[in-house]
Amino acid sequence: MKVEEEKKYALLLAAKDSDYVKKVYGGYYNVFVEAYGEEGEKWDLFRVVDGEFPDMTELHNYEGFVVSGSPYDAYGNDNWILKLCLLLQTLYFMQKKVLGICFGHQVLCRALGGDVRKADSGWDIGIREVSILKESPTCNSFLDLNEIPPTLSIIECHQDEVWEVPKEAKVIAFSDKTRVEMFTNGDHILGIQGHPEYTKDILNNLIDRLLSNGSIERGFAEDARSELHKAEPDRKSLQERKPTTRRTPLSQIDEDRVCIMLSMVESESEDEEITASDEEFLESEIQDFELEFYDNEYDDDNEDMEEDDVDPDELSYEELIALGEFVGVENRGLSEAEINKHLHSSTFQSNSSKTLIDRCVVCQLEYEEGENLVALPCDHPYHLDCIQKWLQIKKICPICNDEVSSTDVAKNV
């Protein structure tokens, strides 16, 4: 008799437990598991807001990931937010199921190339009627979207919003306050601006806390409370899980191969010795991974695509590298001489880092204490070789997207 393997999910908690939620529910972990968990599943908690992240070599063991809401800005450059973006990019390439809620919805959008900003209309707090677009895809591997009605009421509490979704993403819901209430990217990524996991008492307590810390005014708080009595949230509609089916990992790219790559990167960051043959293998596997990803993501849907149909300014670093292997790198970046004019020397010191960035976001390897680096005019640090290769393709900072102009004042490396 075959024993069914226990399914594992991970909650990436981006907020600290409030006193109220701890007292009444035992913490946000219980709130999310009650909303999205099913019998026989194992849910692990990672408090990413405190720097707790899953081991990169264990990611393949999880069926899916949920990113919670947070009082932090998804477009912020806090160290843990940048690290979370890197993790979400990795999960996207691994085709792992990811559900983002509120802040999670926004940071998921940012990680995949979208745009998140303050909302023009200010705070949105209360129960909002959300409209589902008729042409919305009904296939998503985390939630069952088939049974969602044309409109539903959902608890909202945010002052930031998604302004532009990632290139391949689809907007599937909107409201009169927020232009992107829900989006999907493929069949494994789903972002929801509202809080299907919240109950009215949790929101009521949150209104009290926002009022007490000066985030909202008393009149606004009273109006928000009064609106809570006029409607009930459709919590169940966005909590119906789709039955899990076995996915082919990484679009038929060997998942074990990726795990080996990730473990080797992890070991290098922990000062373990990597042999020359290991380095050669890793470089070869990364190149193969990028090429196969490009094949699966683009060639299947664009068999007749011409070179002129691709805009390198809209591609990610991985896609640009893969594209360059096929058609040659289009010169949208800077020359090596121009690049060196914009770089200045930097030394990594964990206790005095201005940017709180502890790794190179191009190669994703952690910096060593006292390591010699270079920084762009925006002061974001990188390995010299990494940022030179990046800027030859794309002349913006990978972190803040500031353009590195050929007319900027030169600095010494």
Image (cartoon, rainbow, N blue to C red):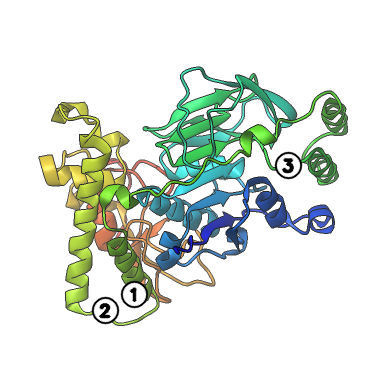
Label 1: few (<14), some (14–19) or many (≥20) C-alpha neighbours in 10 Å: some
The answer to which image quadrant residue 241 occupies is: top right
Mark nearer the viewer, 3 or 2: 3
Q: Amino acid at mark 3?
A: Tyr
Identify residue for label 3.
198
On the question of residue 302 being in view, the answer is yes
Q: Position of residue 287 (x, y in %)?
A: 20, 56
Q: Position of residue 350 (x, y in %)?
A: 50, 71
Identify residue for label 1.
268
Q: Amino acid at mark 2?
A: Ile
- Relative to 343, 244 lies left or right: right
Return the residue nearer the eye: 389 or 70. Answer: 70
User: Between marks 3 and 1, how big is the CA–CA gap?
Assistant: 41 Å
On the question of residue 340 being in view, the answer is no
Return the residue nearer the eye: 272 or 190. Answer: 190
Please report the residue visible at 61 percent of the width from the left and 61 percent of the height from the top: 47
Label 3: few (<14), some (14–19) or many (≥20) C-alpha neighbours in 10 Å: some
Mark with earlier residue (3, 2): 3
Residue with the most extreme front position: 1
Residue 361 position (above or below residue 168): below
Please report the residue visible at 44 percent of the width from the left and 61 percent of the height from the top: 59
Residue 136 position (above or below residue 283): above
User: Between marks 2 and 1, how big is the CA–CA gap?
Assistant: 7 Å
Mark 2 and mark 1 in contact? Answer it, CB < 8 Å.
yes
Q: Amino acid at mark 1?
A: Glu
Mark with earlier residue (3, 1): 3
- Relative to 180, 280 lies left or right: left
Identify residue for label 2.
274
User: Between marks 3 and 2, how big is the CA–CA gap?
Assistant: 47 Å
Q: Position of residue 101 (x, y in %)?
A: 60, 42
Residue with the most extreme bottom position: 273
Q: Position of residue 386 (x, y in %)?
A: 27, 59
